[in-house]
Image (spheres, grey):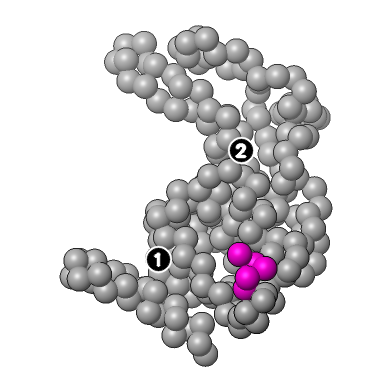
Amino acid sequence: MFRRIHEHNSASLIIDLRNCGGGRDFLGKKLLSFLLDQPFYYYYDLIYNGLEFDFFRYAEGEKPLPDDIAEKRADGKFHDVRHPNLGLQQPSQPQFAGKVVVLMNGGSFSTTCEFLANLHDRKRATFVGEEAGGGYFGNTSGPTVGVTLPNTQVRVIVPLRTYYLAVKDGIQNRSILPDYEVKQSINDILSDNDTVMFRAIELARK
C-alpha cells in the first residue's frame, strides 16, 4: 500500500481506525514505521508481575509462563526480553512524509491505541472523531489466562503483561484526544452520513 501511495505522489493520507479493536502488536509498530523518518522507540518496557499466580488453580491446565520470555530484575518483576517491538526501531521505506489525518473513536483500543499514542506523541498527525478507547501510556494485555471463578462459575480473562509505551506527552487516565471532535448523531448513522470522514477529507485537502 505504501508503495502505491508513493507511486501516486499522494500528498495526504487518511487512516480510519474507528472501531478497530487492535490485533497483533508488531502491526502497530510497522504502520508507524512508514510515517516516521528517524529511528524510534515504540515500547519503553513490557513487564510481568510474575510467571505464575495463585489464580492459575482456577484455570484448567494453566502452567507457569516459560522462564526464557522474561528477565527478573532488581525490582522483583519480570521484564520481557524477546518482544520485537522493544529496542530502537527503524523507519520503513517508502516513507510517507505528507499530511496524515487519523479517524478514531471509543472503539479504537489495544494495538490500535498503541499506534495512536505513539503517533500523537510525535505530533505526526491530525486526529478527528472521538477520544480513543485505550490508555495513552499503555495497557495490560498480551498473554491471557481464562479463569473460572469457583463460586459463581463466571469466566473472566486475565491479561498478564503490562505494556509501557515510549510516550510522554499524554494526559493521565485519559486516552488520545481528538484535535477535531466530531460525533455522529443517530440520524447521521441511519442515513449513512459520515460526518467524521467528511471532516477528515476537508482537513486533508487544506
- Which element carries disc 2, helix, strand or loop? strand
Instruction: Name which quarter of the figure residue 6 lies in.
Output: bottom right
Residue 116 location in percent, x, y?
A: 56, 60
Please tell me which of labels 1 and 2 falls first in the chain: 1
Q: Is residue 168 magenta?
A: no
The circle drawn on residue 130 is 1
Q: Main secondary structure of the magenta part?
A: helix
Tell me where the magenta segment starts and ends, as one range: 1-5
Q: Is residue 4 magenta?
A: yes
Residue 92 location in percent, x, y?
A: 75, 62
Q: Is residue 80 left or right of residue 110?
A: right
Q: Residue at x 57, y 80 (%)?
A: 12
In this figure, which residue is indicated by the disc labeled 2?
162
| Residues at discs 1 and 2 in contact (Cβ within 8 Å) | no
Q: Residue at x 58, y 17 (%)?
A: 53
Q: Residue at x 56, y 75 (%)?
A: 13
Q: Amino acid at mark 2?
A: Thr
